[in-house]
Image (spheres, rainbow, N blue to C red):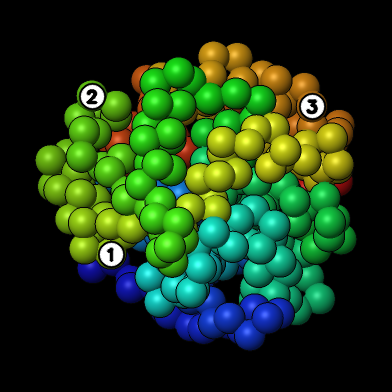
């Protein structure tokens, strides 16, 4: 039976309680702590997707890394009063508090998916001494595709100006045409999870995506950075991953395209295995 991630709460600088889920390093330790940051459409759970997908947390733990997954503010029990205030800048502030708690005095490897890549890059630019290596997966940089732009406009239009800054989340309702080979049980698990816990999401994280390229600061990132893009990813515009790679200041960088994969590789059979192996290999490399 797979181990259940341990839940803990860490206080952000402003006192906001943040959920963090963790698995210890199993077997021979790599000596690395890895912090995973989710994107806008779901919380931390997709880093721990069930078999036959390869759960990223489980894989990295079994490969000797101490693994942590942040439940970003505005999601689950890390909910906040105003979802418009949840954005790359506020989550980057939270990463500082979380890294200090999980690895006192040591550097951390970070991976951010989609809009979760923005706070990872901001934190790496801001606190280079706390960062060993980073990876960003499916993160839009200069432009998003026309199809995703329509979805984004529709979602932001659901914001009630008099409400609490949250918008409707519908990305999970038509996944079959936007995902690589997957198992029906994993797809049902994900749909049920989003319906149960993430039917409404903070508007601020989506506003970051609409305001490209200001949310990312690749020209200020000197940490070793891997850019991972699915070959069929429908969110970033064509060529966007290459533009991001070129803009990153670090000389230690890599651009990887995952064959046959879309925007949610965690749910794909081959995609999840390939991403897990990429992260393990990248985070094992020496700190430069």
Above or below, comparing residue 235 to residue 187 in the picture: above
Image spot of residue 144 (x, y percent): 53, 25
Above or below, comparing residue 149 to residue 265 in the picture: above
At horizontal 20% and vertical 39% (from top left) the residue drawn is 173
Above or below, comparing residue 14 to residue 167 in the picture: below
- Give the numbered dot on residue 177: 2
Which residue corresponds to mark 1? Answer: 197
Image spot of residue 275 (x, y percent): 47, 38
What number of labels is visible? 3
Above or below, comparing residue 134 to residue 232 in the picture: below
> Closer to us: mark 1 or mark 3?
1
Mark 1 lies on a secondary structure that is helix
In primary-sequence order, the first of circles 1 and 3 is 1
At horizontal 33% and vertical 71% (from top left) the residue drawn is 3
Mark 2 lies on a secondary structure that is helix
Which residue corresponds to mark 3? Answer: 247
């Amino acid at each position: 039976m797979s181990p259940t991630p341990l839940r803990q709460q860490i206080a952000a600088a402003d006192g906001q309680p943040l959920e963090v889920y963790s698995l210890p390093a199993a077997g021979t330790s790599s000596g690395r702590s890895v912090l995973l940051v989710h994107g806008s459409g779901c919380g931390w759970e997709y880093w721990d997707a069930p078999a036959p997908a390869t759960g990223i947390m489980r894989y990295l733990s079994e490969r000797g890394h101490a693994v942590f997954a942040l439940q970003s503010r505005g999601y689950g029990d890390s909910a906040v009063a105003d979802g418009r205030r949840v954005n790359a800048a506020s989550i980057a502030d939270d990463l500082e508090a979380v890294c200090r708690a999980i690895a006192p005095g040591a550097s951390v490897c970070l991976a951010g998916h989609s809009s979760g890549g923005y706070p990872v890059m901001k934190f790496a630019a801001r606190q280079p001494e706390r960062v060993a290596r980073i990876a960003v997966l499916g993160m839009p940089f200069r432009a998003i595709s026309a199809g995703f732009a329509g979805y984004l406009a529709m979602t932001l239009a659901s914001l009630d100006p008099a409400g609490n800054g949250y918008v409707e989340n519908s990305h999970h309702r038509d996944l079959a045409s936007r995902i690589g080979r997957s198992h029906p049980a994993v797809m049902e698990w994900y749909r049920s999870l989003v319906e149960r816990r993430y039917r409404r999401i903070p508007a601020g994280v989506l506003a970051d995506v609409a305001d490209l390229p200001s949310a990312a600061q690749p020209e200020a990132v000197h940490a070793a950075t891997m850019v991972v893009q699915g070959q069929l990813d429908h969110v970033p515009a064509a060529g966007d991953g290459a533009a991001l790679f070129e803009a990153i200041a670090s000389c230690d960088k890599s651009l990887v395209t995952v064959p046959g994969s879309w925007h949610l590789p965690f749910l794909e059979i081959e995609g999840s295995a390939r991403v897990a192996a990429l992260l393990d290999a990248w985070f094992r490399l020496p700190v430069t």
